[in-house]
Image (spheres, coloured by chain):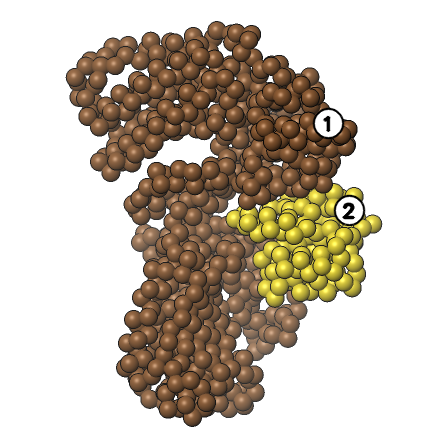
Chain colours: A brown, B yellow
Amino acid sequence: MVTSKGQRLQFELDDDDLKLFCEETDEQIELLDTCLVQLEGEPEPELLQQIFRAAHTLKGSSATIGHKKMANLTHAMETVLDAVRQGKRAPTSDVVDALLAGLDALRILANEVVTRVDSGIETGGLEADLHAVLESPAPEKDSDAATGKGGLTYALSEAVQSAAHESLAQGAACFLVEVQIALECQLPSIRGFQVLQELDALGTPLQTWPDREVIEAGAGELSLAAVLISRQSEEQLQAAVGVVSDVSRVSAKALSAEQLSGPIGAAAGSPEAPAAQGRPQLSVVDNGAEAAKAPKRAAAQSVRIDVERLDGLMNLVGELVIDRTRLQQIREQLAAVLKDANLTELTENFEETTAHLARVTDELQEQIMRSRMLPVRSVLTRLPRLVRDVATKCGKKVDLLTAGEETELDRSVIEEISDPLVHILRNAVDHGIEPPEERRALGKPETGTVTVTAWNQETYIYLSVKDDGKGIDTRRLRQKVVEKGLMSREAAEAASEEQAIQWIFLPGLSTAEKLTDVSGRGVGMDIVRTNIERLNGQITVYSTPGVGSEVVVQLPLTLATTKALMVMARGTVYAIPLVSVTEALGDHEADIHSVNGMKMLRLRSRLLPMMDLASVLGDTRPKNIDAGRFLVAARHGDRHVAFTVDRLLGEQDVVVKSLGDLVGGRRGITGATILGDGTLGLIVDTPSLVNEQALLVTA
Amino acid sequence: MATILVVDDAAFMRMRMSKILAEAGYEVIQAENGLEAVEKYKASKPDAVLMDITMPEMDGLTALKEIRGHDPQARVAMVTALGQQQIVLEAVKSGAKDFLVKPCEGDRVLAAVSKLCA
């Protein structure tokens, strides 16, 4: 290799990246420094994984910035470590020596990135050494004593050893149980927990890898091992554990007293192990275990990340999710085509890889989404001041209580939730809480209380604003809707209390006796609701006269993806956000009526105006044969409609893409999503379509 | 043939699941929320339950606990979307025998159900 000491070097990274690169590189080199020396002898699987991961990370980051020399060297180191990890090469002193020499060179190479000057270091020899180490067979004495042929080894703690010996003495048997979870399993960590439950039922697991706490926290990996005391046979154990879904391989091997004294070897070397040895140990990429280990090195591992960069990452993951879906479709097509060509091994490998890619992508998406989460505290801390100001202005005494500050949500949602929340809170203080004298007369404490609570439930965040004021005056609301001409007197009187309460969301309605400069008049709750529903959220209000009212806002945790019902209408795929869908049914089971020439669907004593989805969105192409075979009932607030569509395609998480300025704000469409086959799907703006329909009906 | 209770608030999912099961010869009863699931379980004591997690009225986890409280032998599999790992884990800790990740392929549903009924 030609080196030119002192020459300027170019790397593909800017100053911001440089900082991150150095922090991460230093961290990994330091980790290798500590761990490589422990490698010699009988390494624990966990240590090996940790070292391998560090080398792998270094390789990836150096290759990314175009540091070829560093990438090549780390690649050579990684290859050796992989062989050790798979039990093909014992970590003898010559292996460790070669790795440590490589590490020293890495330090110098990493520094080149800072100085941008060629250090002149020669790595070809080191790479050759590493290669040579791999070629030379491991000396016999270094191979594992207990089960022979290398493979992963498990070190038993002394306490476990003595407990195992004791059980053997009492006539129970001691087993090494190794379990592999299928690659395509989507929640392997939970399968791991189920395996642990089985083991608990079968006997006493003395020690498990990963640790019991890790498995119980749902952070297990694709493989799991345990030393189990049991009175069952090997076959019985294998059968019982094999009952857990997605378990692809189980081995249970009885251990002798002698075997228990040393580190115990993996079934990779035992005769009855299936021919899966050559398969790479994919459990390394499982970051569940990483998360569980994180606290040990938490301080060094946190890095501040530019929000823009996170947005960029989120976008890339969105692309990846799309590719994943496409790949899965291609896989199905390939499998169908190649089935006859006797290429099953090829398709199996491909399937395994796509399944794994799918799992990693899902996990990656979730992890990145998590990294964009902020505690809702930043919004809540603004509120005490606001409440104080509003209360002073309208001469009221109000205490604000907040709870759930730690609730996390996506930063995009945080930005959007602030204004509606402020508005709801103002309303609560201004219209909800009574003046002190009135409260005293009612026997309530002079100081009113407003409680703001935030909590997560599944993929939603909930924010509740609750006051102990007078509640919503429905008698007054009934008068108002009639005065404003929004409803006939009969209809207003006939409405139930619950229905009347929801009228506070009607545009142009305010029941405040006087116009105040705090909440204004009538430009409140309808706009709040529109904004929240634009975010695919929902707002609900509860009220008890004299006791108080509560407004609950439900929002998705992220705006980057949304759950939707995918439908087909005249050849175009539409995504109807699930939050607005109440029901989907075939037209043969639908009860359709004609009212004043308009088709209506009767659904649970409610008449829903029917809209042809494609037509209403401006699709003028002729209808095809199966047009309108299905109905999707959707709602916005208390208005319901039924969209007619040609086919129901199922529920799906869609990545929301803005249509951008090019297409402009197309009516009834909030955005687009790219489907598995690469075509575009349009995301339906249910609120605007429902409102449009309402106008039509009134007209 | 065994009777399966399919619980999901989404009519479409219920329809699909029920179709898959009915075609395989199972007797299917449906419930559209956790509350209804508990009532129907008590009334008809199905052999197995496929339980969605996110539902109005009563969520799947609560319904699971109620059903297991009523019948400790109840065989329930959770039907989950991705991103609900912690809830699924809690469900398994609370006695759910298995879980399925949406979107569920027909053969996976049948495999899980036959395992539940075994």
Q: Amino acid at mark 2?
A: Cys
Q: Chain of mark 1?
A: A
Q: Which mark is residue A273?
A: none
Q: Which residue is mark 2?
A: B117
Residue A39 can be seen in this image: yes
Residue A348 is situated, as x and y percent measured from the top left of the image, at: 60, 27
Classify A248 as above or below B26: above
Residue B14 can be seen in this image: no
Q: Residue at x 43, y 77 (%)?
A: A467
Residue A355, picture quadrant: top right
Q: Give the label, 2 or 1, closer to the camera.
A: 1
> Farthest right residue?
B1
Mark 1, other Cα within 10 Å: few <14 / some 14–19 / many ≥20: some
Give a yes or no on whether discs 2 and 1 share a subunit: no
At mark 1, the secondary structure is helix
In the foreground, A522 or B80: B80
Classify A94 as above or below A304: above
